[in-house]
Amino acid sequence: MKHYIWALLWAAVILVLCSLPSAATDSVPKFPGIDKLVHAGFFFVFTVLLYYGAIRRSGTSAPSWGISIKVIVFSSLFALFTEYLQWKIFTYRSAEAWDLFADAVGTGMGVFAYLLLHNTYGVNANTNEHIRK
């Protein structure tokens, strides 16, 4: 569990921010679609941190379908959980299918970033040694 501490902390940040009333963010400058961009950003970081934990836990940065599937499933379940909370618990917030889509886009971006960086750099997870391929 210690390898996933950053992902867990980030999940807590997401939960806190998703539970804030809309009035708490009224002073922040906005443009149409900013909330979807924020959702994608939240889940991009969350996915990257899940990969980081999985890499640290396994001791290798070699791509693994098993790890990727677990990261995607866990991130998707967490996205559903946050929207469920906004729907049933934090009723002053709105649960939207487009938010789930933005979460999925962020997750996909995180998976893509992992695969892209892995193919560009060899990383030894035990030493944090980066080797350009």
Image (tube, helix red, strand yellow):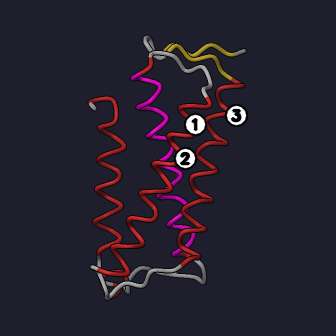
Residue 59 placement, left or right of 106:
left
Q: Secondary structure at mark 3?
A: helix
Asked if residue 45 is positioned above or below residue 89 in the image, the reply reads above
Q: Specify the segment rendered in magenta.
A: 35-57
> Position of 116 compared to 17: left or right?
right
Residue under numbered circle 1:
68
**Quadrant location of residue 91?**
bottom left
Drawn side of residue 29 relative to residue 88, left or right: right
The residue identified by callout 2 is 72
Check disc 1 and report its element: helix, strand or loop: helix
Specify which label sits upstream in the sequence, 3 or 1: 1
In front here: 29 or 99?
99
Q: Main secondary structure of the magenta part?
A: helix
Residue at numbered disc 3: 116
Instruction: Give the crowd class for mark 1: few <14, some 14-19, many >=20 residues within 10 Å.
Output: some
Picture quarter with the N terminus: top left
Amino acid type at circle 3 is: Leu
